[in-house]
Amino acid sequence: MYLYTAQAMREADQRAVAMGYPSLLLMEAAGKQAASRLLQRFEGRAVDVLCGKGNNGGDGLVAARWLAHWGHPVRVYAAEGQTGDAAVARQALLAHGLEIAPLSAWEPAPHSVVLDALFGTGLRGPLEGFYAALVEKVNQSGLPVVAVDLPSGLPHRPHIQADLTVALAGLKNEHLFYPHRAACGRIVLESIGMPPRALHNPHLPEVLCKTSMRPLLPARPGNAHKGLVGRVLVAGGYRSYTGAPSLAALGAYRTGAGLVTVAYPADCVVNPPLEAVRLPLLEWNHADLQAVRAEAVAVGMGAAAGGVRAALAALELGKPTVLDADALHKQVLSAYVKAGLPTVLTPHPGEASRLLEIPSEQIARAPLEAAQALAERYPGLVVVLKGGPTVLAWQPQEAPLSPPLLAVNSSGNPSMATGGMGDVLSGVVAALLAAGLSAWEAARLGVYLHGLAGDLASKPGLLAHEVAEALPSAMRQLQLGGVRDFWEPC
Ligand SMILES: NC(=O)C1=CN([C@@H]2O[C@H](COP(=O)(O)OP(=O)(O)OC[C@H]3O[C@@H](n4cnc5c(N)ncnc54)[C@H](OP(=O)(O)O)[C@@H]3O)[C@@H](O)[C@H]2O)[C@@H](O)CC1
Ligand SMILES: [K+]
């Protein structure tokens, strides 16, 4: 599943038509499915349908026809001047004997629900004048709003604040990235019958979802023993923050690592899980680390100034590695690029800002672009830019001229914004690397499972170790098919 821009969705639409699929069928399905989702949520309320003159308005006209046909009280307000499919939708509505009032005549009616079909992906620039005032009037009415495809006005201001958004054919940027996602309310994705071949576009970012993540879960062989399912070396810790490597160790164990060894400076008190092997070190050196039997390494968690030394010592082990926090320095990343090892780096926006030398606000505004920039700067390293949502980018070294692969996570929630959460993630990804997944697979599955565990454990005051404890359930539910993507209807 991909994440679409308005332009990419228009191209999918054009491909469907070029394949011989009539666009009118898409509009018919869009309107009918929007109507049926509205009824599912707001049964018993009269519906006011507000339609623009483009195809989003056409969807609204179809929805109004079906609502009336199913016997629901509906009032239709529409702009003049529809063309193409939207004009056909208008004629079909009139043929059912419905009346269309001008948008300027709309007044909020008590106990009604508004179907917002003013503007969708065709909006160019912010709404002004009459439409800006109409959007404000809808928002101030306090009525529930169901948006067709996108809350009208997005990605600009003003825009509709919806309770439910029926996304059509595919998820768009606004459905996943804040602050726009907050304007959508609950999101339900409807396929509207779009031919899958028309939607296929590997140049777009992948949306990590249960269908694509489940096949990546490592199988545990019947004759498994702890040396066979992946051993992890965690290297981190410093006086001020000793919890970091312990949480990474817990994350690794709870993701199925067979054995976890925690290496840390001898002058710091680290309390890893009882099941972990402790390796206190007088200094970060490769010879001591070499003695540890591990298939993957997670380095940098809470290591302070020792992070660079720890990461450079770990590099000599020649193992797949996760670099986090204090290991995220330019000299370390350049050395790992040169080594060509499977490597995953997991910066938060502050660390990405330091690496890219751009303000963190810019990263928050355009996280995919920031992850892409990091991936291009450090070819071969998989970039996991943590946030809500976490995004990933990877420029394979063997294909330097192709655009980087991009992905956006769909699991996780704001209760995960607490200390130690990233340390757990490092351990999760390291365990998956140790189990034999490639860096791109381990990073994508690790981020997805970590978010899923956060969703299962979600509550106010959620702690990082509680997310680690929820990882086994997350994996089991993903394996058994018990996971629901956020855009699936309840
Ligand atoms: N995915 C799919 O394949 C399918 C997509 N479908 C649906 O089509 C929708 C996209 O439809 P779309 O392209 O017709 O654009 P839409 O959002 O209706 O807006 C265009 C109108 O807005 C106007 N306008 C623009 N900017 C403006 C501004 N700043 N201020 C004021 N006005 C402005 C512009 O006016 P114009 O410039 O032409 O005068 C034009 O009238 C999509 O979201 C989905 O709902 C389904 O039907 C089925 C298949
Ligand atoms: K809309």
Image (tube, helix red, strand yellow):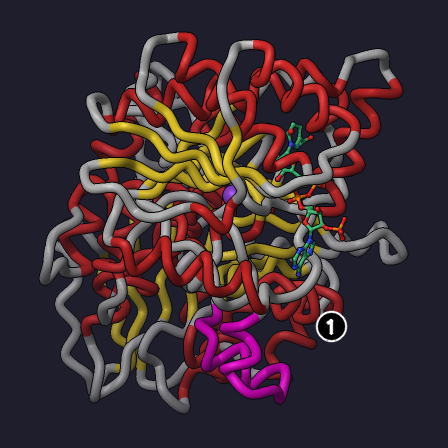
User: With 174 as the anchor, is 358 left or right in this view?
Assistant: right
Q: Amino acid at mark 1?
A: Arg
Task: Write the residue at 83% across / 26% down.
Answer: 15
Q: Position of residue 125 (x, y in %)?
A: 67, 65
Work out whether residue 79 or residue 365 is closer to the camera in this orientation and state it: 79
Q: Would residue 247 be counted in the magenta stretch?
A: no
Q: Main secondary structure of the magenta part?
A: helix
Task: Write the residue at 71% across / 38% down.
Answer: 9
In the picture of the structure, the residue carrying the numbered disc 1 is 377
Work out whether residue 343 or residue 346 is closer to the camera in this orientation and state it: 346
Q: Would residue 352 be counted in the magenta stretch?
A: yes
Q: Is mark 1 within 8 Å of ligand 1?
A: no
User: With 485 as the anchor, is 109 left or right in this view?
Assistant: left
Task: Write the residue at 27% across / 65% down.
Answer: 417
Q: Secondary structure at mark 1?
A: helix
Residue 225 visible in the displayed image: yes
Residue 478 visible in the displayed image: no
Tell me where the magenta segment starts and ends, as one range: 347-365
Q: Position of residue 95 (x, y in %)?
A: 59, 10
